[in-house]
């Protein structure tokens, strides 16, 4: 029996799940449009442990969403996960945020393209077919011809908060947009368990989030 704690803070959704042998048995998350991760994360961890009727000492490993995503959100999640792994002397597992987002839907055929909102008309994207990555994660500017290489071949399902940008630009007949899907610790459960069984773990001391792009500090407009 394997208990894994999954932490997802890469977007505005602050999400924690407790999984037993790859199946979510407790989930606590909040997606209220703001970033409340610093205030809510440890509270949510406590809640899922209580729901699962176990203690931190029963956890076999901790999985964290590694990005891409919000710089601040990723830092909060990874810092918490690393701190707990150090304290409990248990392994750290990292899960690609777009891979777990792709697990939010099940299709019979076609492509799944999870999209995370970046700046302006930019998104972070990956492409999956039959749960296998067919193109690496990229940051790209969306236009009317984006993803035509895949849309011309088969149905393409777009999901995530970045899909909203695409709706107004991509009008291909094979494009299907799925609303209200976002990265969640619920979809991390099976992915983290598969990695745990293969001992696919991170070096807790040196692991860093996958930002994809450098963090840019912008100056407020009213500041001289």
Image: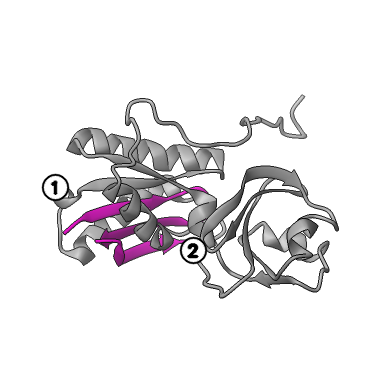
State which quarter of the image contains the C terminus: top right
Q: Secondary structure at mark 1?
A: helix
Q: What residue would you read off at disc 2? A: 103
| Residue 210 in the image: above or below residue 50 | above
Q: Is residue 19 magenta?
A: yes
Q: Residue at x 54, y 64 (%)?
A: 130
Q: Are marks 1 and 2 in contact (CB under 8 Å)?
A: no
Query: Reading the chain from its start, which is encountered first: label 1 or label 2?
Result: 1
Quadrant housing residue 159: bottom right
**As displayed, is residue 123 above or below residue 80?**
below
Give whichever of 15, 58 is nearer the camera: 58
Is 199 left or right of 125, judged from the image as shown?
Answer: left
Tell me where the magenta segment starts and ends, as one range: 1-30
**Screen quadrant of the N terminus:** bottom left
x and y percentages locating residue 209 in the rendered image: 48, 36
- Residue at x 26% of width, y 38% of height: 85
Q: Nearer the viewer, mark 1 or mark 2?
A: 2
- Horizontal side of residue 36 vs 127, given as left or right: left
**Can you see residue 183?**
no
Residue 144 vs residue 88: left or right? right
Question: What residue is pinned by disc 1?
Answer: 57
The numbered mark at residue 144 is none
Tell me: residue 170, above or below residue 121.
Answer: below
Which one is in front, 157 or 14? 157
What is the basis of the colouring in this image? one colour
Please report the residue visible at 18 percent of the width from the left and 49 percent of the height from the top.
56
| Residue 197: percent from left, percent from top | 27, 50
């Amino acid at each position: 029996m394997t208990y894994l704690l999954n932490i997802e803070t890469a977007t505005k959704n602050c999400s924690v799940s407790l999984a037993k042998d790859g199946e979510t048995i407790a989930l606590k998350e909040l997606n209220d449009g703001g970033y409340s991760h610093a205030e809510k994360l440890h509270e949510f961890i406590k809640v899922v442990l209580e729901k699962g009727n176990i203690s931190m000492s029963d956890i076999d490993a901790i999985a964290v969403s590694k990005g891409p995503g919000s710089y601040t959100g990723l830092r909060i999640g990874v810092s918490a996960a690393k701190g707990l792994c150090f304290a409990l002397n248990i392994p750290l597992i990292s899960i690609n945020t777009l891979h777990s987002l792709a697990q939010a839907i099940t299709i019979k055929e076609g492509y799944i393209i999870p999209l995370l909102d970046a700046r302006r008309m930019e998104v972070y994207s990956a492409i999956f077919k039959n749960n296998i990555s067919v193109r690496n994660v990229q940051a790209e500017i969306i236009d009317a011809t984006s993803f035509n290489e895949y849309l011309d071949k088969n149905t393409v399902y777009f999901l995530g908060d970045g899909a909203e940008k695409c709706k107004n630009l991509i009008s291909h007949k094979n494009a299907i947009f799925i609303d209200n899907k976002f990265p969640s610790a619920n979809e991390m459960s099976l992915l983290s368990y598969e990695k745990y069984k293969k001992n696919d773990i991170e070096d807790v001391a040196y692991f860093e989030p996958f930002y994809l792009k450098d963090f840019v500090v912008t100056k407020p407009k009213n500041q001289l």
